[in-house]
């Protein structure tokens, strides 16, 4: 009889978005006349920018004739895209990354989930708490996290780094030294970030302790402050300790188009073994490349036209963030985030849990958000609203919250 990977059975089930959906459906059924505004899920709402649409159309037309048709893409991605990425995201920031250190993929979710495969099972991971759940769950599937304690909602072999108002939502170096450190800045869900100096501290810590940093920079496009690094490779020594993951989802609206990339520098080694070679082997074996059409659309992100249009799009969402941030503050809430990220993280009123506040907002303002406790135990007492809605609904939602 075959056996399953029973690590999957250890997963406590992702109740967050299904519980939200259930509660929202029940409310809507009981109150069919009420118009709900959804500021919960982190999906974008604006259409693809014209420069991207034009590139997509052009690439589709190329596929219609034998001379310009494209089949399987090269393992690491098309050179035109990898060169554009290096120029636009790294060289322009003084970061020394080469095109053959870029691995084009279909998004940061897959990369952040798959990357753990190239590490031994007995590595100890450290994550921020609250956290994007993919980092922990994929390590659970690999059998790296020990046992789950439903009471504390934590795994025995995971190092949690609480990020709360007390430490300004910035993780502190853990007492026990981890092997693999997941960092995501600007952060989902807290919407906060750390300075370049703080990030340099993590790079130094990792190099000193022989740890590797998996740096998720999916929200890099939302950085507005000067002292925040746009890539971890702005930090000295990052080439020997960090893998960076990027996504085209939030900067360019590719959530449905799908494109991302991982950077694995050739200087990142375990003894004599380059992680670059392991990831190249894994990529070539298990992945057949993002579509040519999509990679062409990705290259349009780096054109002058594309950059200008996307700056406007990011600005649109960040204007929503400002509306939410200032509106909530005016209404007396303690709020953070929203300056370098499209997420606003608010403290729930005294005596209300994250889920209490979810119900309160749904019933009193007909606004849907995300309970902070769904992202980890240190998210309890917090609540996430996203700036990815349209402007009119965002304004309406905040007016309703103010009027509760
Ligand atoms: N990383 C973080 C921190 C995210 O919040 C998300 C999506 O919400 C992703 C990665 C997923 O990115 P992608 O759409 O490229 O898979």
Image (cartoon, rainbow, N blue to C red):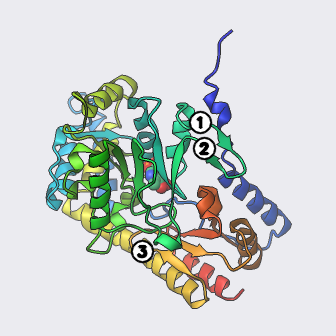
Q: Are marks 1 and 2 in contact (CB under 8 Å)?
A: yes
Q: Which residue is mark 3?
A: 318
- Label 3 element class: helix
Number of the front mark, 2 or 3: 2
Residues at marks 3 and 1 touching, judged by CB atoms closer than 8 Å: no
Queried on whether the Cβ of the residue with tag 1 lies below 8 angstroms from ligand 1, the answer reads no
Q: Is mark 3 within 8 Å of ligand 1?
A: no
Q: Which residue is painted at 43% across and 65% down in the image?
A: 170
Q: Secondary structure at mark 2?
A: strand
Q: Looking at the image, is mark 3 or mark 1 earlier in the sequence?
A: 1
- In the image, residue 152 sits, relative to residue 125, either above or below, namely below
Viewer-nearest residue: 48 or 178? 178
| Between discs 2 and 3, the one toward the N terminus | 2
Residue 379's place in the image compared with 281, above or below, is: below
Quarter residue 301 falls in: bottom left
Which residue is farthest top? 1
Instruction: Say which of 79 and 200 sits in front.
Output: 200
What is the CA distance from the residue labelled 2 to the residue labelled 3?
35 Å
x, y percentage for residue 12?
68, 42
- Check disc 3: other Cα within 10 Å, few if <14, some if 14-19, many if 20+: many
| Nearest the eye: 311 or 199 | 199
Quarter occupied by the N terminus? top right
Tell me the CA gap for discs 3 and 1: 40 Å
Visible residue check, residue 60: no
- How far across and down, in percent of the image, does residue 125 sit? 46, 43
Residue occupying the point 44% across, 61% down: 171
Q: Residue 155: which numbered mark, if any?
A: 2
Question: Which quadrant: the C terminus?
Answer: bottom right
Comes first in the chain, label 1 or label 2: 1
Q: Quadrant of residue 251?
A: bottom left
Q: Which residue is mark 1?
A: 146
Q: Give the mark toward the camera: 3 or 1.
A: 1
């Amino acid at each position: 009889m075959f056996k399953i990977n029973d690590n999957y059975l250890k997963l406590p089930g992702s109740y967050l978005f299904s519980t939200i959906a259930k509660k929202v459906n029940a409310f809507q059924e009981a109150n069919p006349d009420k118009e709900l505004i959804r500021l919960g899920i982190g999906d974008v709402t604006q259409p693809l920018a014209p420069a991207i649409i034009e590139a997509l159309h052009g690439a589709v037309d190329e596929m219609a004739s034998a001379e310009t048709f494209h089949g399987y893409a090269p393992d690491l991605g098309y050179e035109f895209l990898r060169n554009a990425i290096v120029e636009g995201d790294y060289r322009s920031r003084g970061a020394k990354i080469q095109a053959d250190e870029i691995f084009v993929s279909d998004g940061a979710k897959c990369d952040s989930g798959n990357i753990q495969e190239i590490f031994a099972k007995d590595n100890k991971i450290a994550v921020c708490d609250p956290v994007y759940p993919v980092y922990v769950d994929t390590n659970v599937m690999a059998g790296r996290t020990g046992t789950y304690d439903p009471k504390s909602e934590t795994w025995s072999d995971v190092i949690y780094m609480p990020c709360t108002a007390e430490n300004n939502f910035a993780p502190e170096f853990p007492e026990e030294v981890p092997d693999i450190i997941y960092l995501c800045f600007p952060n989902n869900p807290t919407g906060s970030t750390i300075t370049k100096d703080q990030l340099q501290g993590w790079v130094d810590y990792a190099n000193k302790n022989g740890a590797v940093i998996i740096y998720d920079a999916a929200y890099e496009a939302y950085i507005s402050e000067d002292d925040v690094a746009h890539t971890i490779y702005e930090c000295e020594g990052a080439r020997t300790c960090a893998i960076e993951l990027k996504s085209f989802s939030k900067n360019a609206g590719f959530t449905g188009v799908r494109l991302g990339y991982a950077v694995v520098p050739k200087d990142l080694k375990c003894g004599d073994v380059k992680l670059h070679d392991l990831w190249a082997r894994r990529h070539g074996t298990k992945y057949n490349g993002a579509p040519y059409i999509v990679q062409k659309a990705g290259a349009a992100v780096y054109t002058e036209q594309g950059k200008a249009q996307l700056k406007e799009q990011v600005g649109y969402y960040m204007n929503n963030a400002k509306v939410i941030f200032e509106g909530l503050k005016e209404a007396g809430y303690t709020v953070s985030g929203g300056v370098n990220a499209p997420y606003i993280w608010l403290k729930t009123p005294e005596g209300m849990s994250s889920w209490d506040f979810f119900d309160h907002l749904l019933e009193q303002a007909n606004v849907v958000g995300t309970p902070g406790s769904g992202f980890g135990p240190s998210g309890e007492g917090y609540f996430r609203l996203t700036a990815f809605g349209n402007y009119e609904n965002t304004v309406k939602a905040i007016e309703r919250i103010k009027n509760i």
